[in-house]
Amino acid sequence: MSEILVLVDHVEGAVRKTTAELLTIARRLGEPAAVFFGSEIDTAREALKHYGAERIYVLDSADLTDHLVAPKAEALAQLVETQQPAAVLISSNAEGKEIAGRLSIKTSSGLITDAVDVQAGDGGVTTTQSVFAGGYTVTSTVTKGTPIVTVKPNAVTPQPTEGAAAEEAVDVEISAAAKTARIVERRQRAATGRPELNEAAIVVSGGRGTGGDFDAVEAFADALGAAVGASRAAVDAGWYPHAYQVGQTGKTVSPQLYVAAGISGAIQHRAGMQTSKTIVAINKDAESPIFELVDFGVVGDLHRVLKSATEKALARRS
Amino acid sequence: MKIVVCVKYVPDAAAHRKFNADYTVDRVGVDGMLSELDEYAVEEALKIRDADESGEAQVAVLTMGPDIARAAILKSLQMGADSGVHIIDEAIHGSDSVATSLVLAEAVKRQGAEIVLCGMASTDGSMSVIPAMLAERLGMPQVTFASEVTVEGDTVRVRRDGDAATEIIEATTPLVLSVTDQANEPRYPSFKGIMAAKKKPVEELTLADLGIAEGDVGLEASWTRVEAYAERPPRSAGTIVTDEDGAGADQLVEFLAAQKFI
């Protein structure tokens, strides 16, 4: 069976949930082979094995981590050349998509980004994408080269299965041309103790209606074990960091439950959350377009409703 | 210094966006505009130009697409760009990101540029891959998703806010730079800018002018194929309650508990 290369997304060896999802998808298409960039494979090994990686290619070179995107694309292209995989799966984040874009050109291979589903099909894969702010679903195939697909978080529920995890250190030659954009400083984002926004099963977001006070939003999120998000209006007002923005120019989330508090539901925001399974909104304005999307809506003051709902949710838990 | 900004004419996200019979995006039958995210690229180019001490820096905007796509150039000129290049050729119709990056790269080579500027994504396809592909094709450093840009001489330094970390990236021109909507606040065209834009030069180029074979672009040359599309059914109307005497929170918690979220 052909290999499916899965580029491991990790933070200092901590494998992200999206990689477990990619390995799960890879099993539908062939034999999952993880590609690990960096020096922390000892931290990552168990998780990769646990989600079914039959092989792990380890590429440990400062060239890969000290420069932006280009060296990773070059290394991956070399692996595609030597291993001839049936497909390459990469997480759909900014860096993942950029690596995929360069890899597509280097290997003359068709590229599909932001897939929400990937199945075996003609030419190796059939993908499903959600486009135009979730207004349409599009199915596509790759007609040239090795299919390169970037996959959005929550496309699939990770299924554990032990893989052989046969490890192979790979030497890569990175050209001088790929080392021209230098990462001169890297600051890890401080942990919030909450789930990652784009991986969370539940997201609670606040918007203009919070008036800048996110306490009720955060408390309700914590009661549900949810991630916290913010609308562009709230971010632009300086009330919440941009890293938590949900929408076209922020993160696209697709959780089981999305709670929009004080968010009107402009197209910019809807583009980032419209594919959520269940949508709940709390807004003072009964005419807000967000109510067109909801499974359940409360017209009322978000601070009052959330504060009371938080108490009730916590009481039910205990 | 020459700055080339790659911009895209896109269907208005607030309009009802559609596909053509060949599964390409309908750009003609729907109201369109300069992609909102490209305004940040134009603004950044203008800022870099205006801060350039030589006073000789120039901003050219580059687009490809049907006749109507000229509106994206015009808006950029109204904001303050100096000139435009419009690649217009029927064979371009249906081009994917690979073909688009080929056309743009050849046009950039023809223009010559110290800085090639792009937005972080288009508001229609929103793949975010064109800047990386351009860097690949042009053999230039890639400094992308910049939320803050500093230019000193031929060194460009940016802040890139990633998923897990914030990185400071540095590279030397010529390079490809893309900016997010955090990088700046795009200006509105002034009346003077709107009047001046009418006199600014816009060059029209064909694929032949760029030395690109028709067979290398367009729908037929695409390395992927759309097999089908379906409009997402509208979400069925949900339950909406009005919070009176604190009952809203009770009903909300009941709903969430029934759905097993609590």
Image (spheres, rainbow, N blue to C red):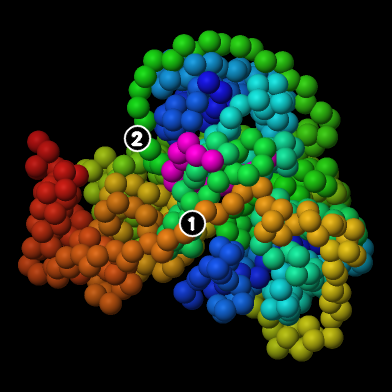
Closer to the eye: label 2 or 1: 1
User: Few, some or many C-alpha atoms within 10 Å of disc 2 (few <14, some 14-19, many ≥20)?
Assistant: some
Name the residue nearer the viewer: A152 or B175.
A152
Q: Main secondary structure of the magenta part?
A: strand
Q: Percent position (x, y) of residue B235?
A: 29, 64
Secondary-structure class at tag 1: strand
Q: Is residue A96 left or right of residue A28?
A: right
Name the residue nearer the viewer: A270 or A299.
A270
Any magenta on residue B118? no
Label 1 marks a residue whose chain is: B
Q: Which residue is mark 2?
A: A157
Q: Amino acid at mark 2?
A: Thr
Q: Percent position (x, y) of residue A218?
A: 30, 48
User: Few, some or many C-alpha atoms within 10 Å of disc 1 (few <14, some 14-19, many ≥20)?
Assistant: few
Secondary-structure class at tag 2: loop
Q: Percent position (x, y) of residue B84?
A: 81, 72
Q: Is residue A181 visible?
A: yes
Quadrant that contains the C terminus of chain B: top left
Query: Is mark 2 in CB contact (under 8 Å) with mark 1?
Result: no
Q: Is residue B2 left or right of residue A228?
A: right
The circle on residue A292 is none
Question: For the residues marked 2 and 1, what is the alpha-carbon distance in whole angstroms?
Answer: 25 Å
**Above-or-below relation of A298 to A81:** below
Q: Are marks 2 and 1 on the same chain?
A: no
Residue shown at the point (24%, 65%) measured from the top left: B236
Name the residue nearer the viewer: B180 or A150.
A150
Q: Percent position (x, y) of residue A245?
A: 45, 54
Residue shown at the point (86%, 79%) measured from the top left: B201
The circle on residue B228 is 1
Residue shown at the point (23%, 43%) measured from the top left: A224
Give the magenta-colored segment's residue range.
A109-122
- Answer with the quarter of the image where residue B183 lies: bottom right
